[in-house]
Structures are given as C-alpha cells and as structure tokens.
Amino acid sequence: MSFLFGGNNRSAEGSVDPAKIEMAVAELDMITDVFNRLVTSCHTKCISQNPQNHRYVEGDLLKGESVCIDRCTAKFFEVNKKVGERMSAMGNAAQATGSFGR
Amino acid sequence: MDFSQFNGAEQAHMTKVIEKKQMQDFMKLYSGLVERCFNACAQDFTSKALTTNETTCVQNCTDKFLKHSERVGARFAEHNAGESSL
C-alpha cells in the first residue's frame, strides 16, 4: 500500500507542488478509509455478533474477541490482496481482448 | 507513506491537512460510537432517564469499542510495517 514518491527533483524550500500534495492526500484518504472499514467490519464480526455482548456486560476485550480481532485483520488484508490481484488480472484480460465484461 | 521527498513547505502543508483530517475522523468516531452504543443498549423506553443497566452497558460498549479500535490499529501498523520492509 505504500506509495514511494520517486524523482529526485527537490523543488525550492518554499514552493508547494500541488500534484504531489494531491497524491499524498489521496493516499492518506484511502488508507484512512481502509482502516475505518476494517474497524467496522471486525467489530461486527467479532464483537457485535458475539452473543455474550448482548448487553455489553464487560468493558474489556474477552480473550476470544482478541483472538478473533487478530484473525479478522489478517483475513481482511488477505482479501484486500486477492481482490487487488483479481482486478488487475481482469484489467489485463480486458486489455488483451480489447473488451470489458465476461 | 513516504514523506522524505517532500520539502519543508510541503511537509508543513501536509501536517495541517493531516491535523484537519484527524479532527474530522475523531468527530465521525464519536458520533458513530454514540449511535452504535445507543442501538445496542437503549432498550427500555418506560422512562426518559437511562437505567443503571443501560448506563453500565453504554460505558462498557464505549470501552470495548475503543479497546477494539486500538487493537485493530496495532495489527494495521504491524501489517504496514511488514509490507514496507518487502
């Protein structure tokens, strides 16, 4: 997910390159969005749906919940990677055949 | 994210942008949490005041969500650190 801003042209100390800023902001937005979705999804899967939390009897994370959260985040990143691979494969296939869709 | 290619002015600008986003993010977190804990805990409408159980429920709900968010953040940071060392 990290985006290395290449190029060794360091502009003058005072000038702001709007294109670079825009890309950095876009990357920041994307990362924040992924994080927020991850928090929401894993909360739904590991905490809200846990029958023991029907009325939130406890303020600390239960052992099962902690384990669930670790696994949930790992799976989320795996899914992220697989979806990315699939989409780039589809993109390549579409370019090869010159058309989109199945 | 790699900020080493940014000059002084750009870094200052990004710092301001990040600060503003963090503020907005915090407000969203707060209102999201209120809705979440309300939906989960407020069940008894025979009175306007929160019952003791409901109050405890809300406190636990908030604590648990924040701890959850903290743990997810830790795993997220680990994952990103792992990725950038590839």
Image: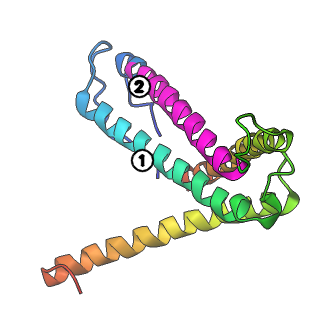
B86 on left or right of B10: right
From the image, which quarter does the C terminus of chain B lie in? bottom right
Residue B51 position in % (x across, y down)? 81, 39
Amino acid type assigned to the residue bearing label 2 in the image: Val
Distance from disc 2 to disc 1, alpha carbons, whole Å, reads 14 Å
Residue B60 position in % (x across, y down)? 80, 43
Amino acid type assigned to the residue bearing label 1 in the image: Met
The residue positioned farthest toward the bottom in the image shown: A102
Q: Secondary structure at mark 2?
A: helix
Q: Is residue B29 magenta?
A: yes
Q: Provide the residue designation for mark 1.
A: A30
Residue B70 position in % (x across, y down)? 71, 43
Indicate the chain on which mark 1 is placed.
A
- Residue at 18% in and 81% down: A96
Indicate the chain on which mark 2 is placed.
B
State the residue in front, B44 or B57: B44
Dominant secondary structure of the residues highlighted in magenta in the image = helix
- Residue at 62% in and 50% down: B76
Residue A19 placement: quadrant? top left
Q: Relative to B68, is A91 above or below?
A: below
| Span shown in magenta | B13-42
State the residue in front, B16 or B81: B16
Q: Relative to A29, is A45 above or below?
A: below
Residue B1 position in % (x across, y down)? 47, 40
- Residue at 49% in and 65% down: A80
A51 on left or right of B48: right
Q: Secondary structure at mark 1?
A: helix
